[in-house]
Amino acid sequence: MFLRNVWYVAGWCSEFGPEAAARTIAGEPLVFFRAQGGELVALEDRCPHRWARLSLGRVEGCELRCMYHGLKFSADGRCTEIPGQDRISSKLQVRKFPVVERYQWAWVWTGDADLADEALIPDVGLLDQPWRRLSTGQLDYEAHHALISDNLLDLSHIAFLHEKTLGRRPDGEPADKEIWRAQSGAEAKQIDRGVRYEGWRTSEFSKSVIQAKSAPNGDTWSRLDYTVPGIFISHVVVYPVGTAAGCNFKAPPPDLEPLGDNMSCQAVTPMTERTTRYFYSSGPRTSDLLEEEAQAMWAVAVEAFLEDQVMIEAQQKNIDNHPGGQMGWIDADRGPGMFRAMMERMMRAEGSSVDSIPPKTEPAVRVGRRALAGAS
């Protein structure tokens, strides 16, 4: 019921210290610890002796000791010590999971270790730019991860669910609904292992409160990528009025100096079939905002993330209360539909079940497939 041969975000690198830390990712109970020297290690959180949780154990140099009967395991999962016993069976082995620390996130591969290709880690280098005022956080959802992905792939909801936060104008009034047209489903297009929205919003459209501080007047270029298994990369850049037309409404050149520059990188990591951890960030340029202004923007964003959580968890309850029910379809579902279809193809290729993914109506699925066919 989960995609396996992918890199999941296990957490912010700063979360993991010298103590054993338990995480459940894609249904796999894992224990993370930093070996002597700083290497981050991920093992199955189950001692092969009596299946005790190794996350309740003790880190000793480069090894982890189970605190039930004292068995000790190396960073590669081999049992190296059994108190009171010299002979050690080769069967006393703990599965090791590939881990990479990159872009301030710790990534773990839950599938076949021989297929763990670091080139498949999505590029979230926006997190590593030191000239940004980076703020970070995370939420735990009582909901299926596909619902959170749907939400991030359909930004048309901002004008309604977030009309008091992200969708509000600086004067406190709801922003013009047209401001989000560039992120409507009709604009979604397929990219390698993901879906992209990109385009201009010219200055005549009302700005949202989240953009107003950094660049009150200008044309806005945004590129939003959502890649497997659930990585959201948003880069929103504001230029002087007339820039959109000057670029023939195509992507601006990289050397064009903007008025304002903001990014957000987010990750959706399934824990179990009905629980998901959501990592989020925001980073305007240091030169665009004072610290107190950046923190005020961040407070608005966090409030919006909580609005998402309330809605999606309520949505999950309705799904659970109506098993076998069917959802409707609108044009804004094109992006979510494209991403779901991609995930389902990859899961079937691995032999994983897709039956647990929340349903669409049959007519909706057909509409989505026609849309996908037209885009290819």
Image (cartoon, rainbow, N blue to C red):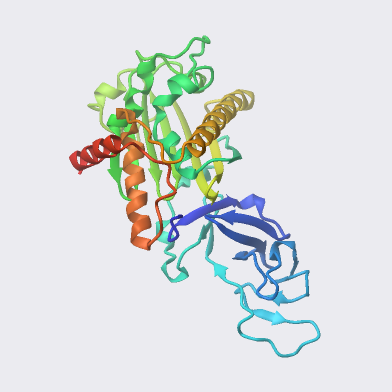
Which corner quadrant holds the C terminus? Answer: top left
The residue at the point 68 percent across, 86 percent down is 88
Which corner quadrant holds the N terminus? Answer: bottom left
The relative height of residue 356 versus residue 33 in the rendered view (above or below) is above
Query: In the current view of this chain or complex, which residue is farthest to the right?
Result: 84
Camera-side residue of 156 and 103: 156
The residue at the point 61 percent across, 82 percent down is 91
Q: Where is residue 236, by image quadrant?
A: top left
* Residue 214 can be seen, yes or no: no
Residue 331 as seen in the image, left or right of residue 300: left
Q: Percent position (x, y) of residue 136?
A: 59, 39
The relative height of residue 335 versus residue 163 in the rendered view (above or below) is below
* Residue 242 can be seen, yes or no: yes
Camera-side residue of 101 and 356: 356
Q: Where is residue 50, by image quadrant?
A: bottom right
Residue 335 as seen in the image, left or right of residue 283: left
Residue 248 as seen in the image, left or right of residue 143: left
Q: Percent position (x, y) of residue 254?
A: 34, 37
Camera-side residue of 45 and 317: 317
Q: Percent position (x, y) of residue 291?
A: 63, 27
Q: Percent position (x, y) of residue 171?
A: 52, 9
**Numbered circles on residues, count:** 0
Camera-side residue of 208 and 6: 6
Q: Where is residue 295, by image quadrant?
A: top right
The residue at the point 38 percent across, 16 percent down is 177
Residue 137 as seen in the image, left or right of residue 324: right
